[in-house]
Image (spheres, helix red, strand yellow):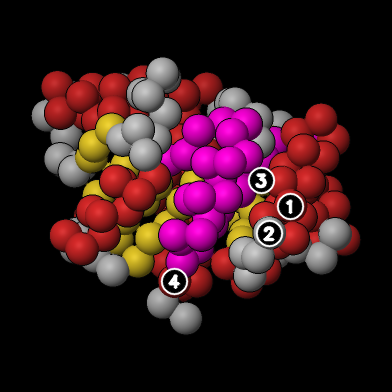
Amino acid sequence: MIVVSCIGQKGGGSKSSTARTLAVGFTDAGWKTHLGDLDEKQQTSIQWCKRREDAGLSNIDCGLYRRVDTAVKMKAQCDLLILDGRPAAETTSLSIAIESDLVIISTGPTIDDLQPSLELCRELIQKGIPMERLVFLVAKTPSLAEGKKAQATIRAWGFTVLNSTIRFQPAYGQALDAGRALFETPFKTLNDEARAMVEEIHDIINA
């Protein structure tokens, strides 16, 4: 029973995209997976699950939660609990991180995106979250070169970052709008890049 959380210091940082894509990837791989949406206002993951069901795609078990401790109870009923956190909610991020085996911090590649995300990671460590539980994902990068530059900045701070990046591509947004995961676009290259992220997370939690 593993808990993976997706958090971000800013809205639009792809944390929900990451959570939903992981949910599909692990479910398809045979894991009993539950996706917990902790954002009562936006309900991004819950609404996406409804679109996925309406489209007749593979079912993703999901739920909406006001409290982290309520969501965490679901880990007793599944192999993998994926928590989609609230943006810019430091208290909630800490509560989620405490309960998680792995915390994925999604960030864009610009300094405006990176700075608050790096500060969030540092604050979590200062409050007792082990550094080895924290990993960054660079998303919505306009190019692979920009993604690698952002990865280098994160590593310079001494933090771990996935080798995978998620580029800013309209096809990804269209897939999510249709209730699909990031690796369910019509384009093999984009699908392979998104699958690489899922496989990298799989390797981390199985190490």
Q: Residues within 10 Å of mark 4 (few under 14, many from 20)?
A: few
Residue contact at pointers 3 and 1, CB within 8 angstroms:
no
> How far apart, in angstroms, are the residues tagged by discs 1 and 4?
23 Å
> How far apart, in angstroms, are the residues tagged by discs 3 and 2?
24 Å
Point out residue 37 in the picture as x, y percentages from the top left corner: 35, 36
Instruction: Tell me: 184 left or right of 138.
Output: left
Q: Decide: is 28 above or below 204.
A: above
Tell me which amino acid carries mark 4.
Answer: Ile
Q: Is residue 179 magenta?
A: no
Task: Name, please, the residue furthest toward the bottom.
Answer: 207
Q: Decide: is 51 above or below 132.
A: above
> How far apart, in angstroms, are the residues tagged by discs 3 and 4?
19 Å
Residue behind mark 1: 123
Instruction: Tell me: 158 left or right of 30.
Output: right
Instruction: Tell me: 53 left or right of 118.
Output: left
Q: Give residue 4's quadrant in the image.
A: bottom left
Q: Residue visible at 85% across and 59% down? A: 157
Q: Nearer the viewer, mark 1 or mark 4?
A: 1
Q: Of the residues under marks 3 and 1, which one precedes in the sequence?
A: 1
The circle drawn on residue 62 is: none
Q: Of the residues under marks 2 and 4, which one precedes in the sequence?
A: 2
Q: Secondary structure at mark 4?
A: helix
Q: Decide: is 178 above or below 120.
A: above
Point out residue 107 in the picture as x, y percentages from the top left corner: 67, 40
Find the magenta span and give its range: 84-110
Q: Secondary structure at mark 1?
A: helix
Tell me which amino acid carries mark 3.
Answer: Val
> How far apart, in angstroms, are the residues tagged by discs 1 and 2?
6 Å
Residue behind mark 4: 205
Residue behind mark 2: 127
Residue contact at pointers 1 and 2, CB within 8 angstroms:
yes
Q: Of the residues under marks 1 and 4, which one precedes in the sequence?
A: 1
